[in-house]
């Protein structure tokens, strides 16, 4: 279906926030799902690009989706040049979403870089749709390379009681990785009452999976992988996971994921 660009605003160098008006038939995305986006009428780049959903709104004005993205190549560079009124081809929402536990006491979000987008949408759905009678403590640990890459905090703070920031260079928040920062607090949470959701660069997720305490928790990771079709046909996004009995198998991030239990992924393969 076609999505109409309402705004495509530069937030930081290399980072943009795009708002799209969608047809009324567009299905509400579940947190963790993604869209395949392609510039309508262009043969180059030919393939679509996968994007997590940053926000979804359906009201009297229509149906709207926001995408928070970073320029990483030709496709996203072309996308950054799209003006108000431009039409994009939108496919989806696709993928296996996060499991949203109905009765957690604690929800922990761990994000790195542009991974702030899907965890923000997840936080909004937890906060807006969980019954008010159920007390939910939701915190986010977010890591960036430096203060010049920090974005999205205002919206996260609307949903989370605390947002803890780390930076590799120490220019903002804790000096070091977001996983190192979280490790200092992990023992203050009780595994049976806590759900952990993570999205960010693969090294960050691998390090999180390697923490001694993490296997005691329910922890899901959203993987950022290159995709060509988004439908599972090309097998370009296959990863190796552990199945029952510890056997290795291949799964497609686009259809079997992009959300996986973090302990099921074979990070060193």
Image (cartoon, helix red, strand yellow):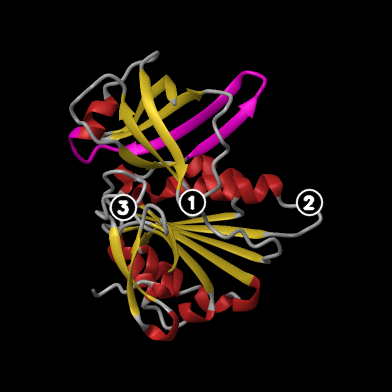
Bin the neighbour count of mark 1 within 10 Å (Cα to Cα): few under 14, some 14-19, many 20 and up: many
Q: Which residue is mark 2?
A: 132
Q: Secondary structure at mark 3?
A: loop
- Residue 188 position in % (x across, y down): 57, 76
- Residue 6 position in % (x across, y down): 45, 19
Report the mark closest to the observer, 3 or 2: 2
Asked whether residue 156 appears in the rendered view, the answer is: yes
Left/right of residue 259 with respect to residue 29 in the rendered view? left
Structural distance between the alpha carbons of marks 1 and 2: 23 Å
**Which mark sits nearer the N-terminus, 3 or 2?**
2
**Which mark sits nearer the N-terminus, 1 or 2?**
1
**Which mark sits nearer the N-terminus, 1 or 3?**
1
Structural distance between the alpha carbons of marks 3 and 2: 37 Å
Up the image or down, 216 lies above or below 3; here it is below
Residue at position x 63%, y 65% in the image: 106
Left/right of residue 239 with respect to residue 263 in the rendered view? left
Q: Tell me the magenta residue range.
A: 54-74
Structural distance between the alpha carbons of marks 1 and 3: 30 Å
- Residue 183 position in % (x across, y down): 44, 74
In the picture, residue 267 is in which quadrant? bottom left
In the picture, residue 137 is in which quadrant? bottom right
Q: Any mark on residue 32, and which?
A: 1
């Amino acid at each position: 279906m076609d999505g109409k660009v309402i705004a495509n605003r530069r937030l930081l160098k290399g980072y943009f926030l795009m708002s799209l008006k969608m047809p009324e038939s567009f299905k509400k995305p579940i947190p963790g799902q993604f869209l395949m986006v392609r510039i309508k009428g262009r043969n180059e780049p030919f393939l679509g690009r996968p994007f997590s959903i940053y926000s979804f709104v359906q009201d009297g004005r229509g149906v709207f989706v926001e995408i928070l993205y970073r320029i990483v190549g030709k496709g996203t560079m072309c996308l950054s040049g799209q003006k108000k009124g431009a039409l994009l081809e939108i496919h989806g929402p696709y993928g296996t979403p996060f499991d949203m536990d109905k009765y957690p006491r604690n929800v922990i979000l761990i994000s790195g870089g542009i991974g702030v987008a899907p965890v923000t949408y997840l936080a909004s759905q937890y906060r807006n749709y969980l019954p008010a009678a159920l007390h939910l403590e939701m915190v986010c640990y977010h890591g960036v390379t430096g203060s010049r890459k920090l974005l999205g905090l205002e919206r996260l703070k609307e949903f989370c009681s605390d947002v803890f920031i780390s930076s590799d260079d120490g220019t903002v928040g804790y000096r070091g990785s977001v996983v190192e920062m979280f490790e200092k607090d992990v023992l203050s949470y009780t595994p049976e009452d806590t759900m952990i959701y993570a999205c960010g660069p693969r090294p960050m997720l691998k390090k999180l999976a390697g923490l001694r305490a993490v296997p005691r928790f329910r922890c899901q990771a959203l993987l950022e992988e290159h995709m060509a079709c988004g439908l599972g046909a090309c097998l370009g996004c296959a990863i190796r996971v552990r199945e029952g009995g510890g056997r290795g198998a291949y799964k497609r991030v686009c259809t079997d994921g992009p959300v996986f239990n973090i302990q099921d992924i074979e990070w060193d393969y």
